[in-house]
Image (tube, coloured by chain):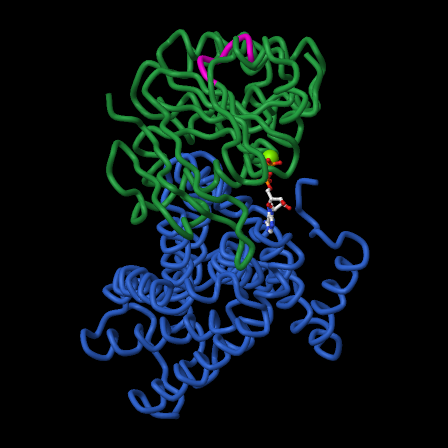
Amino acid sequence: MTAILSARDLSAGYGESRVLRGIDLDILPGETIGLMGRNGMGKTTLIRTLIGLLPALQGQVLLDGADAAGLPAFARARKGIAVVPEGRGVFASLTVMENLRLAATTGEWTEARVLDLFPRLGQRASHRGNHLSGGEQQMLAIGRALMTNPRLLILDEATEGLAPLIRDEIWRVIRIVREAGVAVVVVDKTVSAVLSVVDRVVILVKGQIAWSGPPEILRADPGLMHRHLGVDA
Amino acid sequence: MLTGLIAQLLNGVQYGLLLFLISSGLTLIFGVMGVINLAHGSLFMIGAYLAFGVASLTGSLWLALPVAVLGGAVFGAVLERLLFRRFRTRAHLDQVLLTFALILLFEEGRSALAGNQFHSVPVPAVLDFSVPVIGGFGYSAYRLAVLAICLLVAAGLVWLIERTRIGSAIRAAAENTEMLNLLGFDAGRVHTLVFAGGTALAMLAGALAAPLQSVYPGMGDGFLILSFIVVVIGGLGSVAGAFWAALLVGLIDTLGKAYLPQAAGIAVCAMMAVVLLWRPTGLFSRT
Ligand SMILES: Nc1ncnc2c1ncn2[C@@H]1O[C@H](COP(=O)(O)OP(=O)(O)O)[C@@H](O)[C@H]1O
Ligand SMILES: [Mg+2]
């Protein structure tokens, strides 16, 4: 099975400062990956490089097995890569519906299905982005990403700063998306929640992959968790 | 007295609507691309000279209108691809230098092609009469036609921006081009579209204005300054704001010149100063 997105000996960063070093990663169709690591370890930088917002300084990003260097971010998005970025990226001056319809493509993820997934968005249909609560913005960002009918959905800190009930709602939707066969990459601080949904964990330490494996092994090894994530299980 | 006032009010509205055609592009280009285009007034001038050229060759102004719109769109797209694209993320001073250089270039080109004399463009024959308004008072049919065309264009533009998916993409590009790209839109194309549209509107305004005033060197300068005032009063980037601000500025400038000629020069600038102090985000901004 060809990976949707891969990194091959990938290095990237900002200007002179190299943040990522020698990353090798395959994101397979339908799999769910938890990308973990403490603050500043390079998770967001890796995502930005994979989706074409940052150039690779060394190594390659492959999309469907082909070098993606010449593909700008919008072209990668059209090939089925959707992102909910840190900070959500909801358009403040567009209404909920305008945000959703802007992203719409033909496919299974229709407006009706997204509104069914997040009933709250239907109630706020004509509100502008800047008049939504943080939770509603996050629902909109995820719903909008789904409207592009992605093969891969990448969520960068999607539950950060949200109330527990809304977090649960987001995790519920991530499970539904996963069940629908969409590949998912989640970056999230809530270790227990991540471990309960993902097929595989990838831990970044100082821009390198320090550990990668199934969540059960990580959960069973408190020392490993403590060392790499700074948390106790 | 009353008929004079009605004529001035109509003149003010018509002038304001012409200002809107220019300032809507200026405000969109600033809002979406972050570029201050000082050469926008020159585009208006080019439109007027184009109308003069077409009218001289064909004997009619009508052909000049579609030529200004289509030619403006192509010209704008080329300018954006070749020049403005590279200056989008540069400092405002660099943009000022670039667009000031364009003004000089356009004026030189105009001088070489059409000379430095004043020209007049005749009003199209079918509209060369006056429409009775009240009593014995009549108003130029051509001016009324300009007013109607500008209103149609304004309505179409507001509809495009506020009601269509392309309009949503344009507003989204003004906020966050990166996110727009992540949704699969080529934001660079949106920039080209906005610049092409803004250029087409400015050149259409020039073509429409040609029979109303002489066609002469630097004729865009006054329009550029008033358009910047419109953009500030309406709120940077807001097309709907620019519409109301353009009407306001057009009326105040026209009525001021008619009834208070000593103060007309500063009335509009004073208004801008008050707006900047009182509501710096513009009189018609949403927030
Ligand atoms: N725009 C930027 N310019 C320069 N350095 C940055 C920028 N963004 C992040 N960094 C640096 O890159 C490193 C990794 O950051 P990031 O990828 O955001 O980590 P994470 O998402 O894991 O918290 C950090 O040291 C951070 O300071
Ligand atoms: Mg991050």
Q: Residue at x 51, y 50 (%)?
A: A13
Q: Is residue A196 magenta?
A: yes
Q: Residue at x 41, y 43 (%)?
A: A10
Q: Colour of chain B?
A: blue
Hey, which quadrant is residue A231 in on the image?
A: top right
Q: Colour of chain A?
A: green
Q: Is residue B214 magenta?
A: no
Q: Residue at x 47, y 18 (%)?
A: A213
Q: Pinpoint residue A76: horizontal percent, then vertical percent.
A: 34, 37
Ligand 2 quadrant assignment: top right
Does the rendering let one see residue B160?
no
State the residue in front, B46 or A81. A81
Q: Pinpoint residue B188: horizontal percent, then vertical percent.
A: 38, 52
Q: Quadrant of the N terminus of chain B?
A: bottom right
State the residue in front, A131 or A139. A139
Instruction: Identify the magenta region.
Output: A195-200
Q: Quadrant of the C terminus of chain B?
A: top right
User: Is B4 positioned to the left or the right of A3 in the image?
Assistant: right
| B51 to A180, vertically: above or below | below
Does the rendering let one see residue A83?
yes
Hey, which quadrant is residue B248 in on the image?
A: bottom right
Q: Pinpoint residue B113: horizontal percent, then vertical percent.
A: 29, 88
